[in-house]
Amino acid sequence: MELIEYADVDMLMIQLANKIAGQLRESLQSEDFATLAVPGGTTPGPMFDSLCAAELDWSRVKVMLTDERWVPETSDRSNTRLIKERLLTDRAAAATHLPLFAEGGTAEEKLPEVAGPIEANLPLSVCLLGMGADMHTASIFPGADRLNDALTGTDTLYPMRAPGAPEPRITLSAHVLNNAMRRHILIIGQEKREALEKARHLSPQEAPVASILQGTTVHWADK
Ligand SMILES: O=C(O)[C@H](O)[C@@H](O)[C@H](O)[C@H](O)COP(=O)(O)O
């Protein structure tokens, strides 16, 4: 794991967006398509605001979430809504969105339908993850019902219910996250920095983020 500290959050968001845009361009030099996975939550919005304006051939980029809350897009908890509003806009409106949510059923029922197009576009060229102070990443939470499957199974997606998550979730597996060609984590603030340090000495069961740290670049700013 490599840790990059930035002078402030604004600097981090701009430089990380440049880095990801550069890596997508690099992928597009040798591949017909590039695949980008991004987290939802409250942290990455400003990074999306920069990335969506990046000059690259977005028509050859497929964008997906690392995980989703199983709520309709009308909910302000919807990560799909977040990326539609802040990432799949401007130049990036030309990208193809591979949805991690489908109306009309539970995550368990809809999983095969959602998994098909995602599987057809793996491995991920670039994977950006978030992390919670409880050391979850994507929706792989400590204490979750399918924790072990998501950490050790070879399926692409797992439905997930966890005490720390207010609604059912769906998440890419650690297997898929670890097979990404390039992996980044974006975290802000002292609490998450301390959680990350702690996670490095814990098992993935206790600290799921520990399962994807090898070869990952962590981007951090205090505020
Ligand atoms: O849907 C989600 O919640 C995410 O994808 C999740 O894994 C997120 O990255 C962390 O929970 C951090 O969330 P914050 O950025 O809101 O702290």
Image (spheres, rainbow, N blue to C red):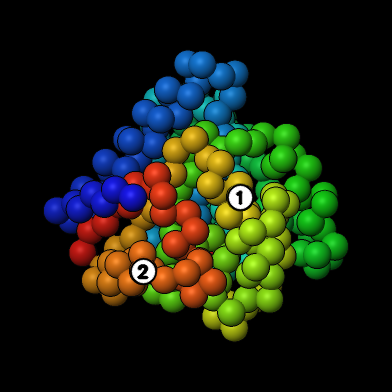
Question: What amino acid is at disc 1?
Answer: His
The secondary structure type at the circle numbered 1 is helix
Horizontal placement of 27 versus 163: left or right? Answer: left
Respond yes or no on whether mark 1 lies under 8 Å from ligand 1.
Answer: no
Q: Residue furthest left?
A: 7
Mark 1 burial class by Cα count in 10 Å: few <14, some 14-19, many 20+: some
Q: Position of residue 70 (x, y in %)?
A: 69, 67
Q: Quadrant of residue 16?
A: top left
Distance from Cα at disc 1 to Cα at disc 2:
20 Å
Question: What amino acid is at disc 2?
Answer: His
Q: Quadrant of residue 161?
A: bottom right
Q: Which residue is mark 2?
A: 201
Q: Nearer the viewer, residue 151 or 41?
A: 151
The secondary structure type at the circle numbered 2 is loop
Which quadrant holds the C terminus?
A: bottom left
Mark 2 burial class by Cα count in 10 Å: few <14, some 14-19, many 20+: few
Q: Nearer the viewer, residue 178 or 183?
A: 178
Q: Which residue is mark 1?
A: 175
Q: Is residue 174 visible?
A: yes
Mark closer to the chain start, 1 or 2: 1
Please identify, in this view, whether the residue under mark 1 or under mark 2 is nearer the observer.
2
Horizontal placement of 113 versus 150: left or right? Answer: right
